[in-house]
Amino acid sequence: MKITGVELRRIAMPLVAPFRTSFGTETSRDILLVRVVTPDAEGWGECVAMAEPLYSSEYTDGAAEVIRRFLLPALPRNLDVHDVGRALEPIKGHRMAKAALETAVLDAQLRAAGESFGRFLGASRTRVPCGVSVGIMDSIPQLLDAVEGYVDEGYVRIKLKIEPGWDVEPVRAVRERFGDDLLLQVDANAAYALTDAPRLARLDAFDLLLIEQPLANDDLVQHAKLAQRLRTPICLDESIESAEHAAAAIALGSCSIVNIKPGRIGGYLEARRIHDLCRANGIAVWCGGMLETGLGRAANVALAALPGFTLPGDTSGSRRYYATDVTEPFELVDGHLEVPAGPGLGVEPIPAVLDEVTTASEWITV
């Protein structure tokens, strides 16, 4: 496959409500889309980097710059998607930028071949169960109202964002209000230290599915120590940037569950490698989200249909985040989303919507 050109398109997507985590509050998304054009097809990739380097060291402007200056020139003139990772390996880091470019190449390749993302990755289901991530609120009554709305919509699992000072009591309130049958988990986004183990152990009383990324992303050893002090399973997210990181975490006993976020680990090929590794070692996985539009959501839903994804992911419906999506919206049906069956991502951007939210566009001839 020969790439003839690449478009870097910036879009501004307002969120339906502010989304607060332990590292900040988002009210809108500044998103970089990558469109790869070949003689036979075009493909789309969505970069999940935030506007500022708060969640990770990557950010939207930086991702566009590294794609423009380093990633595109490193690609061979004729390539298969498997060549992308090898060609970009000498360039350190920038996994979100690499994932966006690789996904666009894969989408174009699969569209030309008439093959879907799900089929290519090895999906074993036609629909996937969906959870929802609930941000930190100003009050517990506000939180309970939000959770009630998502439960009424049919989400099969609730994830609560937590931080020191917003953890035990909000979790207690949700568990008491909605009962023991609600699948409930929490996400700390690395907001705690090992010295907080006694407080985190208080969460054991609420029969949670897991506690996600309680400690720093670069400290697998401390996570292993914490795992010995909690009954609640530890899930790693930011700590897992590659299959090698996953292997180290498993060997150390740092976690028993892994959140696979394709846009953060370098793409869907690496996501499948982590899935295969975890499945072989009896480690449960689920698909995390980064507030993607329908383009990124389509690929995530396809990944979540692989057999090792045994827990509901953050593959929420489009309206959880956006009043109007750039594709036809993903709609929740009985707590599930359908896996797109068409070629490539199986979804297309709606030109009028895409033009309306576009803030900048750059065409690069390759």
Image (cartoon, rainbow, N blue to C red):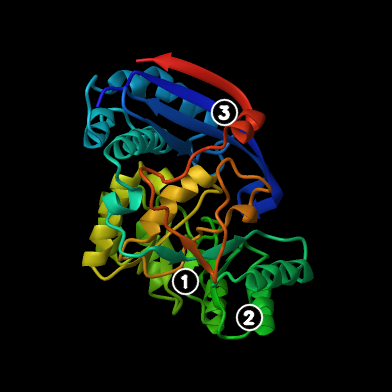
Q: Residue at x 33, y 48 (%)?
A: 116
| Image quadrant occupied by the N terminus | top left
Which one is earlier in the sequence, the residue at label 1 or at label 2?
Answer: 2
Residue that mark 2 sits on: 175
Mark 1 touches mark 3? (CB < 8 Å): no
Q: Residue at x 34, y 34 (%)?
A: 108
Which one is earlier in the sequence, the residue at label 1 or at label 3?
Answer: 3
Secondary structure type for disc 1: loop
| Image quadrant occupied by the C terminus | top left
In the rendered image, residue 274, in percent from the top left (x then y), is placed at 29, 55
Res. 242 visible in picture: no
In the rendered image, residue 94, in percent from the top left (x then y), is placed at 40, 34
Residue that mark 3 sits on: 10
Residue type, label 3: Arg
User: Foreground mark, 1 or 3?
Assistant: 3
Q: Rounded to the nearest whole Å, what is the CA distance between mark 1 and mark 3? A: 35 Å
| Residue 75, image quadrant | top left
Mark 2 neighbour class, 10 Å CA radius: few under 14, some 14 to 19, many 20 or more: some
Which one is earlier in the sequence, the residue at label 3 or at label 2?
Answer: 3
Secondary structure type for disc 3: strand
Mark 3 touches mark 2? (CB < 8 Å): no
- State left or right for residue 243 relative to residue 358: left
Q: Residue at x 56, y 48 (%)?
A: 291
Residue type, label 1: Leu
